Image: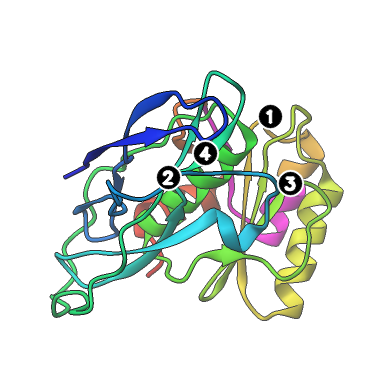
Amino acid sequence: MSESVPVRCPACRSEHHYEAPVYPCACGAPLAPRLDPDGTATPVTHRAWDDEWVTVGCSACGRESEWPRPELGCPCGTVLRVPLAAPSAAGPEPRQPPAPRRAFQPVTIRTARDAVTAAAVYLRWLGYRDIRRADQRPTSGIGLAAHGLLAQVDPTVNPASRRDVECLWLTAMTESTHCVYFSLAGYTPDARTRADSLHVPLFVLDLTGTPQPVNDQADELDATGAG
């Protein structure tokens, strides 16, 4: 499903070939953003969260999901945004009944941004919709929000603390929503004990991008999905 297009760096004039990454839709179908082979790549000079994501429609079930915007790193040091094709005027095909969840397809983690992407991919696999950046900045890491859920992704090298878990839970309580925590470095013993008492699912993100449940609440969420 993925396509390869030529990409020329405007800084050094080198030409590369870029293949769009393929992500799994919640229905299990493979998705990839449509690229414009005749477009011009643009250097990334500054970053804003809204510019980091693009909407990709699934032709199998009609869902529209937000995925990371395609980028290419040139050997000269320039980071390029790969041009995207204009959305089809016809729109997605009619929505079909959702299929059972297929096997989770992880996203390899090499950077902090990859960790956020991996958590977002997992949440979509669980069945959560409209994943976006949370309105409130968490005590550490990045906050994600979806319908009925607030998630915190901590890509640092320090285990999440009891305070981190409590702050996430309190924020979720004020928004009358559930919450879940993803950490690359795991959790302190106090954080795990407090999460159990507050019924906060805890996951550790391994470098393959697969969230590993570390408490009973996370096991239940992994098994049942968004419900």
Crowding at mark 3 (Cα within 10 Å: few <14, some 14-19, many 20+): some
Magenta span includes 200: yes
Looking at the image, is mark 4 or mark 1 nearer the viewer?
Answer: 4
Q: Residue at the location (16% across, 45% down)?
A: 1
Is the residue marked by circle 1 packed among few (<14), some (14-19), or many (20+) residues within 10 Å? some
Label 3: which residue? 141
**Amino acid on which disc 2 is placed:** Val
Check disc 1 and give the amino acid type.
Ala
- What distance separates the C-alpha of mark 4 from that of mark 3? 25 Å
Instruction: Identify the residue under disc 1.
Output: 185
- The disc, 4 or 1, on the residue closer to the chain's N-terminal end is 4
Q: Are marks 3 and 2 in contact (CB under 8 Å)?
A: no
Reading the image, the residue beneath label 2 is 82
Q: Mark 4 sits on what residue?
A: 80
State the mark number for residue 128: none
**Nearer the N terminus, badge 4 or badge 3?**
4
Q: Give whichever of 140, 196 is nearer the camera.
A: 140
**Residue numbers of the magenta segment:** 193-206
When the figure is inspected, residue 43 is found, relative to residue 223, above or below; the finding is: above
Circles 2, 1 touching at the beta carbon (< 8 Å): no
Residue 227, given in percent of the width and then of the height, sits at 37, 70
Residue 9: image location, x then y, percent: 48, 32
Query: How are the colours assigned in the image?
Result: rainbow
Give the residue at x 43% y 49%: 122
* CA distance separating discs 4 and 1: 30 Å
Q: Secondary structure at mark 3?
A: loop
First-in-chain label (1 vs 3): 3
Can you tell which of label 4 and label 3 is closer to the viewer? 4
Pointer 4 and pointer 2: residues touching (CB < 8 Å)? Answer: yes
Q: Is residue 126 left or right of residue 155?
A: left
Q: Is residue 90 left or right of residue 222?
A: left
> Is the residue marked by circle 2 packed among few (<14), some (14-19), or many (20+) residues within 10 Å?
many
